[in-house]
Image (cartoon, helix red, strand yellow):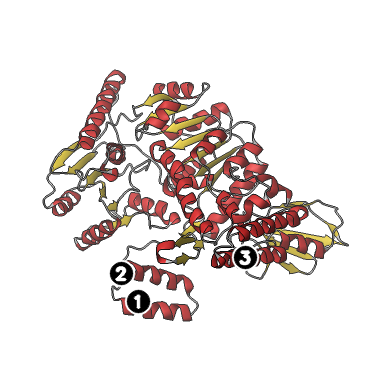
Amino acid sequence: MSFKVYSNFNPTKDQKRVTSELSKKGNFVLLGVTGSGKTFVLSKLIEKEKKPALVISANKTLAAQLYQEFKSFFPKAYSHYFVSYYDYYQPEAYIPQLNKYIEKDAKINKLIDKLRHAAVQDIIQKRHVIVSASVSCIYNLGSPENYQKVSLFLQKGQTISQREIIKSLISLQYQRTETEEPGTFKIRGDKIIIFPVSSDKKIEIELKNNKLTNSFEIFPANFWIPEKNKLDLSLQNIESELQQRIKELKKHPLKAQRIEQRTKYDLEMIKELGYCSGIENYSSHLEFRKPGKPPFCLLDYFKKAYKDFLIIIDESHITIPQLKAMAVQDRIRKQTLIDHGFRLKSAIDNRPLTLNEFENKQTKTIYVSATPAEYEKKRAKIIELLTRPTGLLEPEIQIKPCKNQIQETIKEIKGQKEKTLVITISKKLAELISERFIQEGIKSQWIHSETKTLERPEILKNLRQGKYDVLVGVNLLREGLDLPEVGLIIILDADKEGFLRSTTTLIQTMGRAARNEKAKVILFADKITRSMQAAIEETDRRRKIQKEFNRKNKIIPKKIVSNIKEWSFFKKEIKTEFFVKDKKILEKEMKKAAQGLNFERAAELRDLIKKLC
């Protein structure tokens, strides 16, 4: 395996210059426009420095696109996708004003869980690793040292009984079933057939006279599995904290009783099974971390495995604020649970990193953005990449009045051969507008934050392939999307000043059309706001630089050609949502599906009912 880039592209002089600058010591901001070849430049940088890389994106869609691109550029490296494994997540919470406790409710995507384990295991075992991750990579992931220590090492010729192996597998949270799902095993005579949590390949352990015929390393099925020889001490420490907390709450008997019952139940589960629901809330005790010390996360697995590695923060202007906000929001929620006796104080240390803690773990970092914020500008040197190998210019901008903007949008779409992105200001509007387009005979699909993780890249692929002509979105169509077929961007209510219509948002959104030689942007607005003016001026500045570059190099602008990559993690066909809007009928169908044990269908119907409420 190697960090060798395989590509039909030859780097331009500008790209070579930027790669050379980025390879110097220090941190850098790569200020690159859409279509300038930023990912190619970063790939050449990884090739030049020969370092593993952690690429952090603002959301799962961008992480998926980068994963596909790096996998394409580095076919002989280990490319991985690491994002939150929840399809649905309602965190544990308590609302004092309503005296309402909300239990944690989550639907875990087993495929994403498998991809997370595969990434971590290759970091531990391999050298040529590139992980494309979302901001979830700064969440508590358990100790990398523990993860390795509790792993099961079996060597060829080793004497061991079948019972001992089974006992070890159960301690690693593998379940004995006949389902053949990741994290399970079954027995067939002298064979133990294991279905690893990180792979589709099964492991067959065969014993002859209690001797192993092959060598294996089997990693845990969960990240939070304590070492056996230290478990008793961890449990004693949890019990000690519990007794101290009960004393502190003696003036509040209900809270004291609550924390005692909940914690003792969890302790019993850990003693019996080695695991309990919400075990991560006890991770500081299981890992013997001091109060306030940062939790272990994916960065720690990198730091343990490699002396040096690259950190690339994609679309840093939105990724960094997310990294900053996550710990603050998590702490507020946890503190309320602690104050009212739902969790021990140590649960506060099951959290994402603070921004300061993240900074302390950083190695050489490249911040990537077409619109970098002040944070990155202060911490790193800016290297601009404003020209495109294809000679494409920033799109031309038209401003039209808001009156009859939907009708005008429909006219523009019908007169357009290229694909279109329509940007609105709310999720509900995106859905309604998409439905209106369909009624007008336009092939349309909406996409927003409630679109499932693994469906998003498939929707984008379907747009490029012609299944849809229009995507209607809110904020997911801003940064980094490789959509050369899109020739028209329409931004509705562009003069509604705020986050969704800020200078940065407008520049990023308009940039989605800059991979097409027929690119055009229409802003529906009744006035030119400060954000609009700044965005238009910056777009004009870049356009002038690009024109001069084309003149000097005798380049005629042409559309970017980008292969449509298969999204292998999605199997089910995505359908445009047409559904019955009678709540009673849907509830009847949901109950019928549940009675027939078709729980996936029941869950889909439940979600549709929620939308109608």
For the residues labelled 2 and 3, say whether their Cβ atoms are less than 8 Å apart: no
Instruction: Please tell me how crowded label 2 is: few (under 14), some (14-19), or many (20+) other residues with Cα within 10 Å.
Output: few
Along the viewing direction, whichever of 331 and 153 lies nearer the viewer: 331
Whole-percent x, y for residue 8 in the image: 45, 33
Instruction: Please tell me how crowded label 1 is: few (under 14), some (14-19), or many (20+) other residues with Cα within 10 Å.
Output: some
Whether residue 577 is situated above or below residue 409 in the rendered picture: below
Tell me how far mark 1 sits from mark 2, CA to CA: 10 Å
Question: Could you tell me which secondary element the residue under label 1 belongs to?
Answer: helix
Where does label 3 land, which residue? 260
Instruction: Please tell me how crowded label 3 is: few (under 14), some (14-19), or many (20+) other residues with Cα within 10 Å.
Output: many
**Which amino acid, mark 2?**
Leu
Which of marks 3 and 1 precedes in the sequence?
3
* Label number found at residue 586: 1
| Residue at the (23%, 38%) spot, across then down | 518
- Rendering quarter of residue 226: bottom right
* Label number found at residue 612: 2
